């Protein structure tokens, strides 16, 4: 028998396990909508076995997908060990909508699937293959725990799962030989050796920092300033809004796609980044949504948390692990003019790049590797909404020849945040995914429509004629998703 092998989770990865509760699952999700293409079968369904075999054939590229968590003795810190009982049938599942299944039904199904926590006794991922969609389509709803990977890692995973060519090729699965798991005695010994080496590792890290800094006093001062700025967000908390408060166990999911070319045209007019345009759209939509909820946006200090990729060069292209920092950004929701909103956002993001606010989070995370820190407690009250924006593949991807047409991410909710917005560009589209607390935002479909309205208003202010984005009508107060699921449904 081979020697035991395991991987210790980083402090950041381990936090996502610690933050999870029965009502706050900490997995990310992705709804992927495909044209059926060559995966159709004779009875009008899809070839599920081919999909499962295709995924099994590339699992050797994703080691974490055949590993589960175990715990260090007398500790709340987790490790990755090979799962000796791995069974792909548990992770790749098959379901269907009643034909003809529409997008509202798919959103309701996604809500039910994503609100259930992953089984910690198994590898922390699931893929639900959904047939029955109208328009000769099928969907895959994917769930992966946040402790496995971040958004950038998820983008890298797409490159492993899917092909850039419309070919139907499967590979024989590599033989899986799980490595032996360590005993508690071995884990205690390894942990003692790790703790004993901490002083030497701390000195080595300090020397590395000194060597890499072109201006050591300036670098130290910059990080101290960043920490001070971060502390101020905690001292003066964000305003209380209808989006914030206790989060329940149920979710409501929605999504929307707009044209990336249209977004780039607006970016060019305002001489800003694509991310600035995305945040401008969010600003206008949140402003309208709060006004509809009888809240005066002029009286609010409204902030978002947005992740910043800090993945080191040697980890580029890999999927495993989290390498993210965070910006806390105020949104100018009190300003009605979309042009002035963009100007304020661009000035803020430009300042964040200069101040390197993310370096403060990096420093705290680095210290967190050595000593326990309650990062969720530190961030509590500093933000109103989570907004991520990820650049995805800008070419079509295929699963066994079936083209991936749309890709919508859902970020997990955390304490006090009833809404998470995940934006990803893919093959000429900007795909918006909304994950909301069902009780706090049952009208999230109204917010989705307001996102499109805000986008159109921003385009009008820029003098841009929208070419690639279809019109979307504003829904009624009770959206079709709410009606489909049933108010207060617990399924």
Image: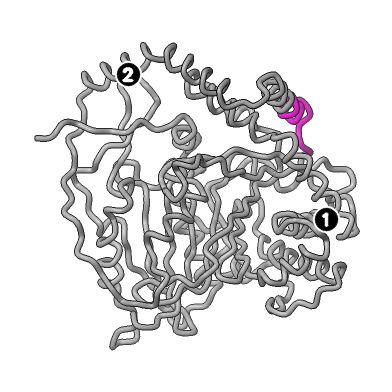
Q: Position of residue 405 (x, y in %)?
A: 51, 74
Element type at mark 1: helix
Find disc 2 in the rendering and name its residue. Answer: 191
Find disc 1 in the rendering and name its residue. Answer: 342
So how many labels did they put on this image? 2
The image quarter containing residue 235 is top right
Q: CA distance from mark 1 to mark 2?
A: 50 Å
Are there few (<14), some (14-19), or many (20+) residues within 10 Å of tag 1? many
Q: Is residue 346 above or below residue 477?
A: above
Please tell me whether the stretch drawn in magenta is mainly helix, strand or loop: helix
Q: Tell me which segment is drawn in magenta.
A: 228-239
Name the residue rendered at 46%, 78% in the picture.
133
Tell me if 436 is positioned left or right of 159 in this view. Answer: right
Tell me if 45 is positioned left or right of 431 in this view. Answer: left
Q: Which residue occupies the foreground of this view, 10 or 335?
A: 10
The image quarter containing residue 192 is top left
Q: Is residue 79 above or below residue 319?
A: above
Q: Which residue occupies the foreground of this view, 224 or 205?
A: 205
Name the residue rendered at 65%, 35% in the picture.
358
**Which image quarter holds the N terminus?**
top left
Q: Position of residue 396 (x, y in %)?
A: 49, 72
Tell me if 489 is positioned left or right of 84 in this view. Answer: right
Of mark 1 and mark 2, the one earlier in the sequence is: 2
Are there few (<14), some (14-19), or many (20+) residues within 10 Å of tag 2? some
Q: Residue furthest bottom?
A: 42
Q: Which residue occupies the foreground of this view, 248 or 95?
A: 95
Tell me if 327 is positioned left or right of 180 in this view. Answer: right
């Amino acid at each position: 028998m081979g020697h035991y092998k395991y991987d210790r989770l980083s402090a950041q990865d381990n936090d996502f396990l610690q933050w999870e509760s029965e009502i706050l699952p900490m997995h990310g999700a992705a709804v992927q909508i495909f044209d059926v293409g060559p995966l159709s079968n004779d009875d009008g369904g899809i070839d599920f076995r081919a999909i499962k075999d295709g995924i099994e054939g590339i699992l050797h590229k994703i080691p974490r997908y055949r590993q589960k968590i175990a715990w260090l003795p007398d500790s709340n810190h987790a490790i990755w060990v090979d799962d000796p009982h791995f069974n792909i049938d548990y992770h790749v599942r098959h379901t269907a909508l009643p034909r003809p299944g529409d997008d509202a039904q798919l959103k309701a199904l996604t809500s039910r699937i994503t609100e259930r926590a992953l089984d910690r006794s198994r590898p922390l991922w699931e893929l639900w293959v959904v047939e029955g969609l109208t328009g000769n389509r099928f969907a895959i709803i994917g769930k992966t725990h946040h402790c496995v990977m971040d958004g950038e890692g998820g983008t890298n995973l797409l490159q492993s799962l899917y092909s850039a060519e419309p070919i139907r090729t499967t590979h024989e699965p590599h033989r899986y030989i799980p490595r032996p798991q360590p005993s508690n005695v071995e884990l205690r010994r390894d942990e003692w050796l790790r703790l004993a080496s901490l002083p030497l590792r701390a000195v080595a890290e300090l020397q590395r920092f000194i060597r890499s800094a072109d201006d050591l006093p300036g670098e130290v001062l910059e990080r101290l300033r960043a920490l001070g700025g971060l502390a101020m967000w905690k001292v003066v908390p964000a305003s209380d809004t209808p989006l914030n408060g206790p989060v329940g166990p149920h979710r409501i999911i929605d999504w929307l796609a707009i044209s990336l070319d249209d977004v780039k045209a607006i970016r060019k007019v305002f001489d800003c980044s694509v991310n600035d345009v995305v945040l401008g759209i969010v600003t206008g939509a949140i402003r309208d949504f709060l006004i509809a909820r009888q809240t005066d946006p002029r009286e609010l200090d409204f902030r978002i948390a947005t992740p910043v990729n800090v993945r080191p060069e040697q980890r580029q292209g890999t999927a495993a692990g989290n390498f993210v920092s965070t910006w806390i950004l105020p949104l100018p929701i009190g300003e009605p003019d979309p042009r002035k909103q963009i100007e304020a956002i661009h000035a803020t993001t430009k300042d964040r790049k200069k101040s390197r606010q993310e370096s403060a989070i990096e420093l705290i995370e680095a210290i967190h590797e050595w000593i326990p820190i309650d990062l969720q407690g530190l961030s509590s009250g500093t933000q109103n909404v989570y907004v991520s924006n990820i650049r995805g593949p800008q070419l079509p991807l295929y699963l066994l020849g079936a083209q991936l047409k749309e890709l919508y991410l859902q970020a997990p909710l955390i304490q006090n945040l009833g809404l998470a917005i995940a934006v990803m560009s893919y093959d000429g589209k900007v795909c918006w995914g909304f994950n909301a607390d069902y009780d706090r935002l049952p009208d999230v479909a109204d917010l989705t429509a307001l996102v499109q309205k805000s986008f159109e208003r921003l385009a009008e202010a820029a003098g841009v004629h929208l070419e690639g984005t279809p019109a979307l009508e504003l829904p009624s107060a009770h959206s079709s998703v709410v009606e489909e699921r049933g108010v207060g449904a617990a399924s």
